[in-house]
Structure formats: C-alpha cells, structure tokens
Image (spheres, rainbow, N blue to C red):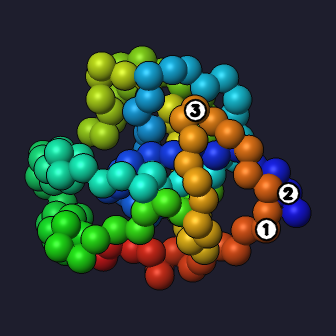
C-alpha cells in the first residue's frame, strides 16, 4: 500500500482532468509540491458547473468534447470516488490555457492516467489516501 496526495474536484472538471483534456486545476491556493497527485470527484455536481464546462468546450471548438459533455449531462458522471493520477509541475497565476479561470491559481498538470473508481470521502485541500491503485487503459476513459 502506498500513500498518495489527493484533491477533490467537482464534476465535470474531474472527468475532463482524468481524460487528459484539462492541463490545469483551478484552485484558490498555491500547491508547492511537484509530482504525483490523485484526483477525486466530489459528491456534488452543480448544474452551473456543467453549463460552465459546456461554455468552455464551445469556445475551444471541439465537437467530440461537446458531444461528450451533452451525453455526460444526461447520463451523469461518477461522484465521490478517485478518478485519476496526474503529475503536477507547479502553480501559476494567469496561465495561458483555455481551461484557466483567471480569478484563481492554476496548478499545471499533465500525464493524466485514469484509475479504477474507488469510493472516497472527500475533504478540502490536499489530503493523504492510502491504498493500491489500478490504472485503466486510457481508451476506456476517452471522450472520442
């Protein structure tokens, strides 16, 4: 068993990170560590978040992502579980990304790997989870 740092993100953002689509996490605080971070989907899914994601996807112009977002809005998304492992490369303010909310700090992430969805009770901030991860093939968690 290993210990991993985890942060919770609301859907649909958690799924977009797990798919490797988003290159930033928008947070209100700086994260000084670099390296592995697990992404958990919070138990809350707000309609406003789904509308904001759809607006962002429309501005990017990705038909495949837009189709995924509309299907996800109808079918629902996983909540209250681990979703992915990412690599954190640092934090920036005003990072140039279509996913950046410029009222927040962007944590730069890459190398998203979907993991088996393990139920967790989320917490605020970054917290430790102990357990074994099972990585899923990226093709099983793709929007296209």
| Crowd tier of the residue under label 2, counting other residues whose Cα lies within 10 Å: few below 14, some 14–19, many 20 or above | few
Position of 84 compared to 98: left or right? right
Q: Is residue 3 above or below residue 113?
A: above
Label 3 or label 2, whichever comes before in sequence order: 2
Position of 71 compared to 118: left or right? left
| Crowd tier of the residue under label 1, counting other residues whose Cα lies within 10 Å: few below 14, some 14–19, many 20 or above | few
Question: Which residue in the protein does label 1 denote?
Answer: 132
Q: Position of residue 92 (x, y in %)?
A: 48, 21
- Residue 35, quarter of picture: top right
Cβ atoms at labels 1 and 2 below 8 Å apart: yes
Position of 60 compared to 127: left or right? left
- Residue 136, quarter of picture: bottom right
Q: Is residue 55 visible in this depiction of the protein?
A: yes
Q: Which mark is residue 142?
A: none
Q: Residue at x 58, y 32 (%)?
A: 125
Question: Which residue in the protein does label 3 denote?
Answer: 125
Question: Which residue in the protein does label 2 denote?
Answer: 2
Q: Is residue 56 visible in this depiction of the protein?
A: no
Q: Position of residue 131 (x, y in %)?
A: 79, 63
Q: Quadrant of the N terminus?
A: bottom right
Label 3 or label 1, whichever comes before in sequence order: 3
- Residue 126, quarter of picture: top right
Q: Is residue 93 above or below residue 6?
A: above
Q: Residue at x 34, y 68 (%)?
A: 77
Label 1 or label 2, whichever comes before in sequence order: 2
Q: Position of residue 52 (x, y in %)?
A: 18, 44
């Amino acid at each position: 068993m290993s210990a991993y740092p985890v942060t919770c993100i609301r859907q649909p953002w958690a799924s977009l990170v797990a798919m490797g689509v988003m290159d930033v996490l928008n947070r209100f605080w700086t994260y000084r560590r670099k390296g592995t971070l697990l992404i958990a989907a919070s138990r809350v899914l707000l309609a406003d978040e789904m509308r904001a994601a759809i607006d962002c996807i429309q501005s990017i112009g990705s038909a495949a992502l837009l189709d995924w977002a509309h299907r996800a809005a109808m079918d629902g998304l996983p909540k209250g579980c681990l979703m992915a492992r990412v690599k954190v490369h640092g934090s920036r303010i005003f990072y140039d990304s279509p996913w950046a909310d410029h009222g927040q700090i962007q944590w730069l992430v890459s190398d998203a790997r979907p993991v088996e969805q393990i139920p967790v009770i989320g917490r605020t901030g970054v917290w430790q989870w102990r357990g074994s991860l099972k990585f899923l093939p990226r093709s099983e968690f793709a929007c296209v």
